[in-house]
Image: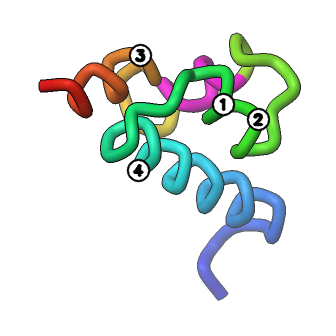
């Protein structure tokens, strides 16, 4: 119905939630990776940058700005 698979939807939803937590709560990148279901913060960072065009660290900085 939305042009993607269920797993793509779940991944996208988790990445959006992780971004919100990075920006609003300032959680660590490792915590965001874990909450998004990634065992590796590096893999999370790659997926995050692909999805949003910025790194998780850049998103986290906006929480402190």
How far is the residue under mark 4 from the one under mark 3?
13 Å
Q: Mark 4 points at which residue?
A: 20
Left or right of 44, for residue 17: left
Relative to 43, residue 6 above or below? below
Residue at screen point 66% across, 30% down: 31
Asked whether disc 1 touches disc 2, contact meaning CB atoms under 8 Å apart, the reply is yes
Q: Name above or below for residue 32 compared with residue 11.
A: above
Q: Residue at the spot x=63%, y=73% of the render?
A: 3
**Residue that numbered label 2 is attached to:** 34
Q: Residue furthest right?
A: 39
Boundaries of the magenta span: 44-49
Where disc 3 sits, the SS reads helix
Characterize the local packing of mark 4: few (<14), some (14-19) or many (20 or more) Cα atoms within 10 angstroms: some
- Residue 55 screen position, x and y as percent: 42, 19
What secondary structure is found at the residue carrying circle 4? helix
The quarter of the displayed image where residue 45 is located: top right
Q: Which residue is drawn at 58% across and 47% down?
A: 15
Classify 10 Å Cα crowding around label 3: few (below 14), some (14-19), many (20 and above).
Answer: some
Which one is nearer the viewer's eye here, 3 or 54? Answer: 54
The residue labelled by disc 1 is: 31
Q: Does the magenta stretch include residue 47?
A: yes
């Amino acid at each position: 119905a939305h042009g993607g698979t269920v797993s793509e939807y779940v991944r996208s939803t988790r990445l959006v939630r992780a971004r919100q937590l990075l920006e609003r709560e300032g959680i660590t990148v490792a915590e965001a990776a874990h909450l998004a279901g990634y065992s590796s913060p590096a893999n999370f960072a790659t997926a995050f940058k692909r999805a949003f065009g910025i790194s998780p660290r850049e998103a986290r900085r906006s929480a402190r700005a």
